[in-house]
Image: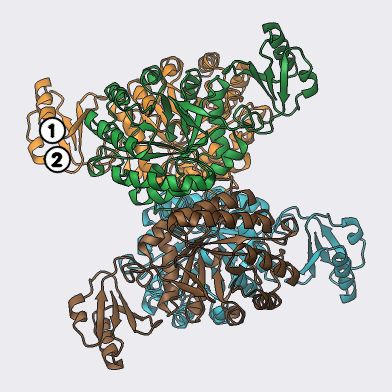
Chain colours: A cyan, B orange, C green, D brown
């Protein structure tokens, strides 16, 4: 059950409801992100006493949520959430493109890439300063130096930035620089990180894990929401299967499925989803056509020299062509780009 | 190596080349589908003596094909093959829609469905007379009676028909009625069936197996081509993964991948690929956007009463909406619909 | 519901029961493999009128079967079925080893291999005369010549033989020579083949498909049983997953699962299950320890020269060591070997 | 390349080698776990100048390691590593059983379980104080209170304890109480956690991720080793596949594969690997037969009341039977138990 309180509900009224629900054996989570107080009462087995709660003083609404995720469900919130990264809206009418290199390598690389993708129509700049690498011997990112580069490039270009945060220790550091904090696929079930990010006031881009079901993805989002951070954007980036012609298998049916059961916006990352430059353009079109709220695209001025994931990075001119095609497609699905 | 002979090459010239290649330890396959004789010489290890063969009398061209599939590869044939089902072209500029019920249940059902989908713009009628069913106790199809219904509906509507053939025994029977013979996912590696179908002169619609790689799909197509039937259309219909929100995981990256390495046209079946009615429309858009040559869509006037796969069948009016959206999308990818 | 009739039940009594069940909307399948007539009444929704059927004349027993497979379920038959291949019992107290090359290449190869594996303790000889090959250009087996070799080697060694049957056309031919007919993984859902094999009177070795669930495996077995052939042996041979250190992922939990829900014996094929010679011995031990009724092992005197699957074939001396270890292990799980 | 220095090598000699390798473009990692200094030089492309390094003063040995993981590879260390948890050796001749509940719920539960599993022959006690839960509304563990219970039970029973550590913040806390720190499947690629654990001096039990290849597992182990912690135990616990009769698909071929390419010991967790109580016993036998160095088994005195994973927990008497069977099996594979 999710209970929304009236704007002028008192602390006593709130406590009374909490106490009642706890007495009935429910766990009570306060989700205070917006103006009004929202409680989720969660329990196994017994159905919550909806009518009894609805008539308590201060209660505006009480709803039963059948999904295991509560605050992330469309039963809880019927309109799609619009999340702002800087002044860019994700989940609104526009299909938003986020672009940039996998890894920040130098200021020159970032300036060049950012100028190019902005000129083509990208609205958000991506780039990794802290990189999760399968091998301890691979380049692990420039760290704070990379964040500083991002900040200077934002200054120059006006593009808000999204960058990955790897661990709880660097949440504050990354949050100082970034406009949106990305949780990578490998960290989708790093619950300590999710809890800490749930207590920041920055939008979070949460990528689907390599073998995560959509219910698991939404329960990971619920960790963020339950801590009070409602600024959550999901991202489909391919799952691991036997199919070997692409690095991952991009599961585009995730987009309409998530949109039916959740109010959170969802992006698609065809760069990681395919791992191959030549597949990024057609799968980007497919992602827009299926209804994605935006795309994350890796772009590098010299992919052959990239420190990571070069084979999937587009050249700036390929990104321009992608953008051109997205602009043609978006109106067909009732969007702009 | 694939060797194409000149139009006026003699039988002796042909035999001489065959003999030479066999002497060198290659296996020689004659692929006589079109006017000109084509040989494929296949062998492990040793590289074929390209220059020696090229200069032999009667030889027009000799090419090395790096892929394990030869006749199906784009190295062998550079332009995309256009396959005709009746007077409908697959692989040409139009995105072709094939629609109809999973299973033929009655003439009334077929007439109703066919009229509706034709009115919306479908060009080919689908419907199963022989059904591969997981359980021996499930309805196995109307058999020849179903084929007769299909033929009568073709008469009425002018729509050519595609229907599944399950085994070698019924190839002739089904070929008498159908304009295109479908090989289902479970039969993709039924090599005896493929060989027999390779000797018919009907176009074949070959569906990807549930856990088949694309190389395996193309090697199954090669069985058809190697027997002389070059009229092969491929179809992506979802693969089996851990992901449980859809019945299968539709692997749309298969489309551009196949198009790069093979000259055969490729369709997408979002009905089986998702198993859920509400996902068919968005995934159909995605399939067109990714570049598919056509779609196979299950349509039923009363899905709730369907004898098989009701949950994934569209109502005729949903199909009309799908067609409307496909028509808007096709021009964006340089196609008509 | 499964109904068993008394030994002296009359045709009229049988028809009366069939008629009653059909009137109630059930589909009725006669499964006349053994002396007594067995009917399975299958239907959606409504529960069968157990008590009413039990009291009808001629009826010995009527049981409700909750599983979708009926005759294959342990609810239908409580003791494990013991299937005979020649005079070798599968499903009894002994763990049975079937061994031999993937493909029959020559009489010399077979004689040598058979003598060696028999000396080590194998009880059944395997070898493929008709081979399902991914590529049309790969060696497809010696065909009937291979079967004749098998028959001569059986004469010499006394080992009964199991060999694959690929299609309905060759069922009679293969059945003339073989003691047990193998259905390969790719044909697990070749329902026409299963139906025909269900009408032979030879034991069938049914391999799990590469992406088949166990329910699907048992429903394929049900096709055989429903046609009257109760001599069915199952075989786990690995499934297709992302995991790339073996050719397939051997799913040993299939063994106790099948044994709980079905009365059919189940073998394990660690040769295909791993695709790597060095893994065959440890996974064979694991298969015996998990409770398998037997093993299928590929053995070749010169694996490096094998025409197919050489990398997974054991040398005869490795097989002898495997057999030695199986003999030590079997008593620990209450079996002999 | 991995370079081992002589015991009396000087700091200058070490620096000289490091400098030379860096000049040549290699990344140099010092792995100072044991008495002697070990360096790993890692680089793309160029082969290291083995002979030149070998003759430098202070160098005992220099080896080329073909695997992407270096310190974890058997090329680097030929004998299997024996890791001590308290006074229990993992990787030695004994198959070691670790047992206990999924989650620590109360002191009484732990005392009861510990006494029972110790009596049966378990050598290490497991139990979770910090629990990674898919849903934020599920019980997250008793936290430090749970650790204190573990410590008291160790006092009473003498069993060393293994417990999961979820994040970098709690590494010190958990390390104060535990004898071995477990990294769960979801954290296998939490590289920040791995780095921090690499700097502790406690043995680490590293579980394979749900969709991790074995190369990825060993590269995650390499993170620990590269930081100087050589006390690493691996654990196979099932991977995620389409196969739905068990919660995960236990990939037992991982055991011999890891043992061939790495010197690290490897356990099997059939409780998570199957998710079903009735499958734990047969899969435990299989794990011992395949060669595992030990087993992790969930045991709960009242599984039906367990706060997590009740369906896979054994009753103490079932664990006793498991232990009895393991004792019979171990000698067959040359081990004790």
Local crowd at mark 1 within 10 Å, few (<14), some, or many (≥20)?
many
The label on residue B21 is 1
x and y percent of residue B75 in the render?
25, 41
Q: Position of residue B27 (x, y in %)?
A: 19, 32
Q: Residue at x 9, y 21 (%)?
A: B12
C3 is higher (above) or lower (below) than C127: above
Residue D314 percent coordinates (x, y): 66, 56
N-term-proximal mark, 2 vs 1: 1
Secondary element at tag 2: loop
Residue B261 position by quadrant: top left
Report the Cα–Cα distance between label 2 and label 1: 8 Å
- Drawn side of residue D138 relative to residue C99, left or right: right
Give the crowd class for mark 2: few <14, some 14-19, many >=20 residues within 10 Å. Answer: many
Residue D247 appears anywhere in the view: no
- Of all chains, the one bearing label 2 is B
The reply to whether dot 2 and dot 1 touch (C-beta < 8 Å) is yes
Identify the residue position indicated by label 2 in the image.
B48
Same subunit, tags 2 and 1:
yes
Viewer-side residue, A189 vs A152: A189
């Amino acid at each position: 059950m999710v209970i929304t309180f009236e704007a002028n509900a008192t602390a006593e009224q709130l406590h009374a409801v909490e106490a009642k629900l706890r007495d009935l054996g429910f766990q009570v989570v306060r989700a205070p992100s917006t103006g009004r107080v929202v409680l989720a009462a969660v329990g196994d087995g017994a159905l919550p006493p909806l009518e009894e709660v609805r008539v308590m003083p201060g209660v505006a609404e009480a709803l039963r949520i059948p999904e295991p995720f509560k605050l992330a469900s469309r039963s809880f919130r019927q309109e799609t959430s619009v999340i702002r990264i800087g002044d860019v809206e994700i989940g609104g009418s526009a299909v938003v493109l986020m672009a940039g290199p996998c890894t920040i390598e130098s200021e020159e690389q970032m300036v060049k890439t950012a100028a190019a993708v902005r000129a083509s129509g990208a609205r958000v700049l991506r780039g990794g300063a802290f990189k999760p690498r399968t091998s301890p011997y691979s380049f692990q990112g420039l760290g704070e130096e990379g964040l500083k580069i991002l900040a200077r490039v934002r200054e120059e270009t006006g593009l808000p930035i999204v960058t990955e945060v790897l661990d709880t220790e660097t949440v504050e550091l990354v949050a100082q620089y970034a406009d949106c904090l990305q949780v990578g696929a490998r960290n989708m079930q790093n619950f300590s990180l999710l809890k800490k990010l749930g207590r920041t006031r920055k939008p979070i881009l949460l990528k689907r894990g390599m073998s995560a079901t959509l219910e698991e993805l939404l329960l990971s989002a619920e960790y963020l929401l339950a801590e009070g951070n409602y600024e959550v954007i999901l991202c489909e980036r391919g799952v691991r299967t036997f199919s070997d012609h692409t690095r991952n298998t991009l599961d585009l049916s995730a987009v309409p499925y998530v949109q039916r059961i959740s109010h959170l916006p969802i992006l698609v990352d065809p760069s990681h989803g395919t791992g191959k430059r030549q597949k990024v353009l057609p799968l980007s079109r497919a992602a827009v056509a299926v209804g994605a709220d935006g795309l994350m695209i890796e772009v590098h001025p010299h992919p052959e020299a990239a420190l990571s994931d070069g084979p999937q990075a587009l050249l700036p001119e390929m990104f321009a062509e992608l953008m051109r095609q997205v602009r043609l497609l978006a109106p067909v699905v009732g969007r702009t780009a």
